[in-house]
Image (spheres, rainbow, N blue to C red):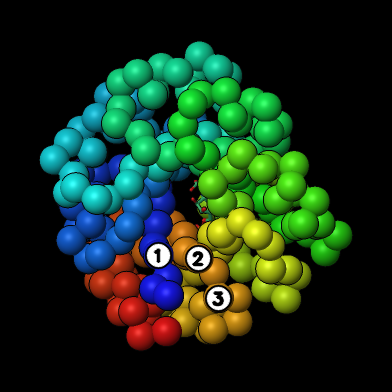
Amino acid sequence: MRTRVKICGITRQQDADFAADSGADAIGLVFYPPSPRAISVAQAQNVTRGLAPFVSTVALFVNPSVADVSRCLDAVSVDIIQFHGDESPEFCSQFGKPYIKAIRMKPDTNLAQLSEAYGSAQALLLDAYQPGVPGGTGTTFDWSLIRQIEKPIILAGGLSADNVAEAIKQVRPFAVDVSGGVESEKGIKSHDKISAFMREVANA
Ligand SMILES: O=C(O)c1ccccc1N[C@@H]1O[C@H](COP(=O)(O)O)[C@@H](O)[C@H]1O
């Protein structure tokens, strides 16, 4: 099966369009103000304006309020929500939208248990754990910690054109998610790096 690709942390319309034209299945928008890739609802409307059909828009939050999420969903055409903090299954499932739950992997993470707890999630996104930083760390984690679960797995954390083929070979995830690995600077995507990443995924 083809490995799907999500390119996260998009802040500019030209990067969203380039990702879509390059074959990305989803683009991610970060609604987490401390992130260098954070965008406002108004910016998100611009970024997604004219996005090609069949490319999903993922809205990323870290421990948001209900009002934060609702305000975004009311104004932006969001297909999937990505919860990247400590949100409970009840919190995540209240918005009537498909959602992805991010799990920051530690040696004792019990994926089977989490997969059951977040039964309403569409997929689990597995990211590196770094104390005090919720995500977008640009670091990989020990992929041998991953156990196969019923749910689709989205592999994230420090991926780039240099390691994504090996990651796919080892993990066989449903999808890969990249942010820092396709940037020229934080929040600005490198089109050359996106092309190289997409090539590596296609050939993996
Ligand atoms: O991108 C961010 O700034 C960010 C902030 C807070 C939570 C998650 C964030 N990004 C997500 O982190 C992973 C891994 O990113 P990277 O490829 O290692 O840079 C990815 O899922 C992003 O969506």
* Cα gap from disc 3 to disc 2, whole angstroms: 7 Å
Picture coordinates of residue 89, whole percent (x, y): 68, 33
* Disc number placed over residue 174 in the picture, else none: 2
Question: Please, what is the three-letter code of the amino acid marked with disc 1?
Answer: Arg
Tell which residue pokes out farthest to the right in this image. 108
Which residue is denoted by mark 1 in the rendering? 4
204 versus 27 height, above or below: below
Residue 55 appearing in the image: yes
* Front position in the image: 40 or 45: 45
Which residue is denoted by mark 3 in the rendering? 172
- Mark 2 surroundings: few (<14), some (14-19) or many (≥20) residues within 10 A: some
Q: Earlier in the sequence, mark 3 or mark 1?
A: 1
* Front position in the image: 97 or 135: 97
Q: Earlier in the sequence, mark 2 or mark 1?
A: 1
Q: Secondary structure at mark 2?
A: loop
The residue sitting at 67% across, 43% down in the picture is 119
Q: Secondary structure at mark 1?
A: strand
Question: Please, what is the three-letter code of the amino acid marked with disc 3?
Answer: Arg
144 versus 185 height, above or below: below
Question: Please, what is the three-letter code of the amino acid marked with disc 2?
Answer: Phe
Kindly indicate the quadrant of the structure image that contains residue 92.
top right
20 versus 91 height, above or below: below
Q: Under 8 Å from ligand 1: the CB of mark 2?
A: no
* Cα gap from disc 2 to disc 1, whole angstroms: 6 Å
Q: Secondary structure at mark 3?
A: loop
